Amino acid sequence: MNDLAGKHIVLGLTGGIACYKAAELCRALIKEGATVQVAMTDAATQFITAVTMQALSNRPVYGSQWDAREPNNMAHINLSREADAILIAPCSADFMAKLLHGGADDLLSLMCLARPMDTVPLLIAPAMNREMWDHPATVRNRAQLQADGCTVLGVGTGDQACGETGDGRMLEPQELLQDVVAFFQPKVLAGQQVLVTAGPTFEAIDPVRGITNRSSGKMGFAIARAAQEAGAQVTLVAGPVSLPTPRGVRRVDVQSASDMLLAAVECSQSASIFIATAAVADWRPAHASDQKIKKDGSGQTPTLAFVENTDILATVAQSVRAKAGALYCVGFAAESHDLLAHATAKRIRKGVPLLVGNIGPATFGRDDNALLLVDADGARELPHNSKLALARQLIAEIAKRTAAKSHA
Ligand code: CTP
């Protein structure tokens, strides 16, 4: 993916041990397609050299407002006008305080103050000792910076360079990258509460065996990420998969279809959009044995009886909230053939306004897919692409439909 293609980021470094992570962040931003202009405070140069940052960004690093390399001697104006965003990582407690007061006695703070606020957003990734992070002054500064339009990215928790443990570490480069990518996505689901089910379910036969399927959960996880990037609060009810939780998404892990039903019904009470991507087992063993079923030496195989699992999507789609129009439900259909016919019939059968079809065997476990969107007006194809790109397109389609509904 080149999620930052065409974006020019001013990466500002202030004094803190987390400067070592800024080197990795710079690479990650560039790998994602951005161009990066590094600016450093004097304090930052105590922790990492401009040489390192120049080599990684492939551009001269700026540090002084008196830099004679700029023909008009206005680095603070020139650099800030080119930027699509200024990202300060790490942002020290001192620099937060300076930003708050509009201080401008070094190039980086001058640039932040001189930036056109409407077109050049400011993002900061704080990094400091836990006592400094929890200090009322920093808490106040954080709140006021947010009120002034600055995006304060979170902090990590854990071991700190000083030997203490707590909140205040700078987020990891990959986390910051995801946050920057998310920042640039259109906020088409702002204010929405989205519930996603994803992955397979596991239906126990005994304590060591069970029945599951080949769903990887990748499409559902991509949809949860895309919804979060679009500004929604997202809950992801996930069957047994080993995928990392998308940033900012609340995850509820479940095993069986019955667990998933309980979790989904409960979470749907506060959701405004429900997207059912999970490959829920249609049947479960009628009786799961408490103990491992042993061979008895007779050569006889055990007989398994099955009962049908409740249809989670259909249940939620029949709920009072969905019927009242407070919950927009989207189903998925994994088919092996006749996608349009099956998806059209399934949409009616499940009682949902939108059903998304895909060819199951062609997509299980892969990072790409193609989708067919079927609603009351007909069908629309989202051609072959990465699952994340398709997830973003699907979220845009859902946003259009829910916005149209709320204006109807
Ligand atoms: N689904 C669900 N609960 C179930 C079964 C399915 O919520 N017990 C949801 C899936 O998450 C998906 C949609 O229903 O959004 C379609 O699931 P699928 O298994 O493809 O359809 P089935 O209803 O099982 O139909 P068929 O077996 O005919 O393909």
Image: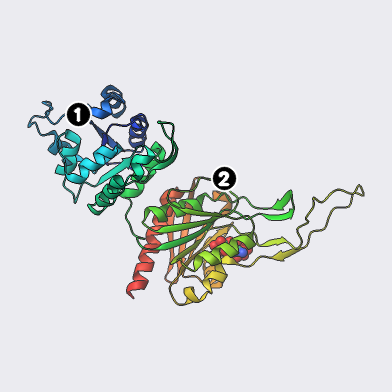
Foreground: 44 or 225? 44
Disc 1 marks which residue? 63
User: In the figure, is residue 160 to the left or right of 153?
Assistant: right
Question: Residue 373's x, y, as percent?
Answer: 45, 62
Question: Residue 397's x, y, as percent?
Answer: 39, 61
Image quadrant holding the N terminus, namely: top left
Which of labels 1 and 2 is toward the front? Answer: 1
Question: Residue 287's x, y, as percent?
Answer: 77, 61
- Whether residue 58 can be seen here: no
For the image shown, how many numbered marks are present on the structure?
Answer: 2
Coloring basis for residues: rainbow
Mark 2 Cβ inside 8 Å of ligand 1: no
Mark 1 neighbour class, 10 Å CA radius: few under 14, some 14 to 19, many 20 or more? many
**Is 358 located above or below residue 105 in the figure?**
below
Mark 2 neighbour class, 10 Å CA radius: few under 14, some 14 to 19, many 20 or more? few
- In terms of secondary structure, where does tag 2 sit? loop
- Whether residue 205 can be seen here: yes
Which numbered circle lies on residue 242? 2
**Is 95 located above or below residue 351 in the figure?**
above
